[in-house]
Amino acid sequence: MTVLLETDRLRLRAFADSEADVERLYALDSDPEVMQFLNGGKPTTREALRSTSLPRLLHEHPCIDSRGFWAAEDRGTGDFLGWFEFRPLREDSSAEVELGYRLGRTAWGRGLATEGCLALIRKGFTELGVERVTADTMAVNGRSRRVMEKSGLIHVRTYFQDWPDAIEGSEFGEVEYALTRADWELRESGRTGLI
């Protein structure tokens, strides 16, 4: 099992092309609250997970010599909590990556999303050659926006898209948050008293 990183409470490991991971993903994507801001709360079928989601989660990105999606597990129990995304926006460059996460309700309200995001951001800026981290969510998704803000990302813009299947709240648009390496380094130097 390839492990990308560990935090105090999380282990981020590579997904496997296995029925066990398909079942974990199915349970996650079957929760209407987890899927609320993604598709209005509809479950993902096992077939869609096998044919579409899992290949995306297993994709290798040569520019970072790594995958872009990682299964999140509780370090203490080994329980599957969901996943994190740290995926280059271009196949040939690690300069800009998209940060994302989908955690089950058992992980909500415990600071785990922020903990995982902070660790990925640090790894990206210190080891993977990342220059900019970006993240998007629906404008009405307050919990996800708070995670982005606690992770140091700044609101860049609100934008509107035409979705084929609009869901409740989409009329308020999407928001993009971002953090550059320069801004991250400035904050980190301030935390360590190096300014």
Image (cartoon, rainbow, N blue to C red):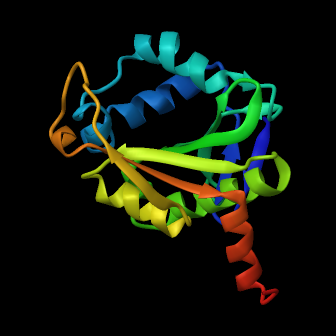
Is any atom of residue 80 visible in this view? no
- Asked whether 169 or 55 is in front, the reply is 169
The total number of labels drawn is 0
The percent position of residue 120, horizontal first and vertical second, equals: 68, 53
Residue at (50%, 47%) from the top-left corner?
A: 135
Q: Is residue 162 left or right of residue 27?
A: left
Tell me the quadrant of the picture where the C terminus can be found: bottom right
The percent position of residue 169, horizontal first and vertical second, equals: 17, 43
Q: Is residue 81 above or below residue 7?
A: above
Residue at (76%, 45%) from the top-left corner?
A: 4
Q: Is residue 169 left or right of residue 149?
A: left
- Asked whether 100 or 178 is in front, the reply is 178
When asked about the image quadrant of residue 60, the answer is top right
Q: Is residue 32 above or below residue 78?
A: above
When asked about the image quadrant of residue 32, the answer is top left
The percent position of residue 85, horizontal first and vertical second, equals: 58, 40
Q: Is residue 62 above or below residue 98?
A: above
Tell me the quadrant of the picture where the N terminus can be found: top right
The percent position of residue 149, horizontal first and vertical second, equals: 47, 65
